[in-house]
Image (cartoon, rainbow, N blue to C red):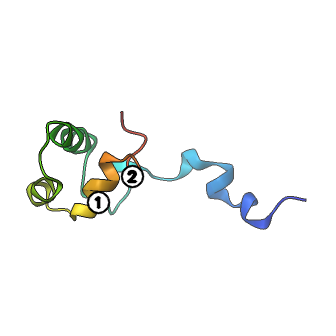
Amino acid sequence: MIATGDRHGARLHPETRPRGERHPNSSLTTACVQAIRALAADGTRHADIAERFDIADRHVRRIVGRRAWRHVQ
């Protein structure tokens, strides 16, 4: 038996869901995400990165840890 949630459109066809800068509420671009990861790799504090891109520092942690924007290399 298939669980009800497994038949949801987002599960069956994830490619149809807007991700990244295609999402209407996105304030970042792919280039911004790559820059955030590069700055973090160079040792810049997450709070400073967040201030520079006008986002929350917890969102910077999620981007660097690849829990958000994981589709961006």
- Residue 59 sits in quarter: bottom left
Q: Secondary structure at mark 2?
A: loop
| Residue at horizontal 21 percent and vertical 62 percent from the top | 57
On screen, residue 21 versus residue 9, left or right, reads left
What is the x, y in percent for residue 64?
A: 30, 46
| Residue at horizontal 69 percent and vertical 51 percent from the top | 12
On screen, residue 28 versus residue 20, left or right, reads left
The amino acid type, in three-letter code, at marker 2 is Ala
On screen, residue 24 versus residue 29, left or right, reads right
What is the x, y in percent for residue 2?
A: 85, 58
- Does residue 7 sit above or below 34 in this rendering? below
- Furthest residue toward top: 73
Q: Secondary structure at mark 1?
A: helix
- Does residue 35 sit above or below 18 in this rendering? above
Task: Say which label, 2 or 1, has the lower sequence index.
Answer: 1
Q: Which residue is mark 2?
A: 68
Q: Quadrant of the C terminus?
A: top left
Kindly indicate whether the residue at mark 1 contacts the one at mark 2 (C-beta within 8 angstroms).
yes
**Tag 1: Cα neighbours inside 10 Å, few (<14), some, or many (≥20)?**
some
- Furthest residue toward right: 1
| Residue at horizontal 20 percent and vertical 62 percent from the top | 55
What is the x, y in percent for residue 56?
A: 22, 65
Q: Quadrant of the N terminus?
A: bottom right
Q: Which residue is mark 1?
A: 59
Residue 51, which numbered label? none
On screen, residue 34 versus residue 44, left or right, reads right
The amino acid type, in three-letter code, at marker 1 is His
- Residue 42 sits in quarter: top left
Q: Nearer the viewer, residue 42 or 38?
A: 42
| Residue at horizontal 20 percent and vertical 37 percent from the top | 41
